[in-house]
Amino acid sequence: MDRTIWWDHQADRIGLVDQTLLPGRYEATACAAIDELVEAIQVLRVRGAPALGVAGAYGVALAARTITADDLEEYVSRVREASNRVRSARPTAVNLAWGVDRALESIGDAGDADEVRARTLAAAERLAEEDLVMCRALGAHGAALIPDGATVLTHCNAGALACVGWGTALGVVRSAVEAGKRVNVIACETRPLLQGARLTAYELQRDGIPVTVCPDSAAAHLMHEGGIDVVIVGADRICRDAVFNKVGTYMHAITAHHHGIPFYVAAPSSTLDPDLPGAGIEIEERGRDEVACYGGTSTVPAGVPVRNPAFDLTPLDLVTAVITEKGVFSDPTALFP
């Protein structure tokens, strides 16, 4: 699969796969202004923690190219202001702010605007390359945990579309298949925006990896039947006591724990947040229409409120191991030396 997000050097702007169009259409779109990037992040044209980290870094490079000022100090201040708009586009995933910060740090003692532009783009390109390397390393570590012939249940999309390429949870699956193992995937549809049905199933079918989609509410039944060998998901933030991932992850972790099924979280170390406990993290609440409408038809009576949290909190004591590019951590405390 091609890269999910990249820098278009000819047009001097960000290119990305518009994930809102999948699986019907695989199309690229461009972000030539900060407003366009913020909108792309908020409506999930680009999504997934690692991809958002790279989007944040590219956003700084884009700001550096679209902002002008009379002197260097004012110019850098305006670049930082625009970059902070990108940083705040989504509050829960830590990678977005991490990517913005990495690119801003590269400005350092730059002597003029041209040097700022060069440094920030170089930093963003490094992050994109690092993401590919990290996902490959993570996948190799995690592949050893997948038995030959296993059926793996996953939630949301933690594949190439959620990263620059290869993927985290699906990167483990891809690496296991690449190593010669037979793997079948059950993809939970992931209400309300169906990232599992639309994106995970699209990726795996495209790669020739067997995949079946099930409703989120069927996962417990499938585990009870004995048809699930491993559960593996990605993460948007990992704190010292909890994992934040797409809402629905918590119930899968509880059910897997009840049935004695390994529950793995696959995420690069950039997703780790050693500073805040789970209780200190804001969980993004998205709009009513994502739940109350389907295909343009109202599915909830007018005037009835909905709750639409984008993520949930899974205590780390429900996680069998966390897989990063640095290895497999069955003791979560070892993630934060």
Image (tube, rainbow, N blue to C red):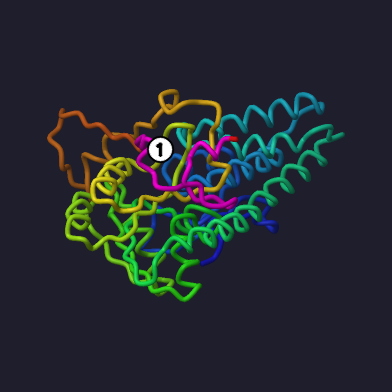
Q: Which residue is mark 1?
A: 316
When asked about the image quadrant of residue 37, the answer is top right
Q: Is residue 203 above or below residue 86?
A: below
The residue positioned 57% from the left and 48% from the top of the image is 31
Q: Is residue 138 left or right of residue 264?
A: right
When asked about the image quadrant of residue 177, the answer is bottom left
Q: Identify which residue, 6 or 276, lies in the foreground.
A: 276
| Residue 316 place in picture, x, y as percent | 40, 37
The residue positioned 47% from the left and 35% from the top of the image is 90
Q: Is residue 61 left or right of residue 213?
A: right
| Residue 207 place in picture, x, y as percent | 43, 72
Q: Identify which residue, 237 or 294, lies in the foreground.
A: 237
Q: Identify which residue, 46 or 214, lies in the foreground.
A: 214
| Residue 151 place in picture, x, y as percent | 31, 65
Magenta-span inclusion, residue 88: no
Q: Amino acid at mark 1?
A: Leu
* Quadrant of the image containing the C terminus: top right
| Residue 139 place in picture, x, y as percent | 52, 60
When asked about the image quadrant of residue 275, the answer is top right
Q: Is residue 66 left or right of residue 111?
A: left
Range shown magenta = 311-336
Magenta-span inclusion, residue 324: yes
Q: Identify which residue, 119 or 230, lies in the foreground.
A: 230
The residue positioned 50% from the left and 26% from the top of the image is 276
Label 1: which secondary element: helix
Q: What is the total number of numbered labels drawn onto the structure image?
A: 1
The residue positioned 54% from the left and 62% from the top of the image is 140
Dot 1, how many residues are within 10 Å of its Cα: few (below 14), some (14-19), or many (20+)? many
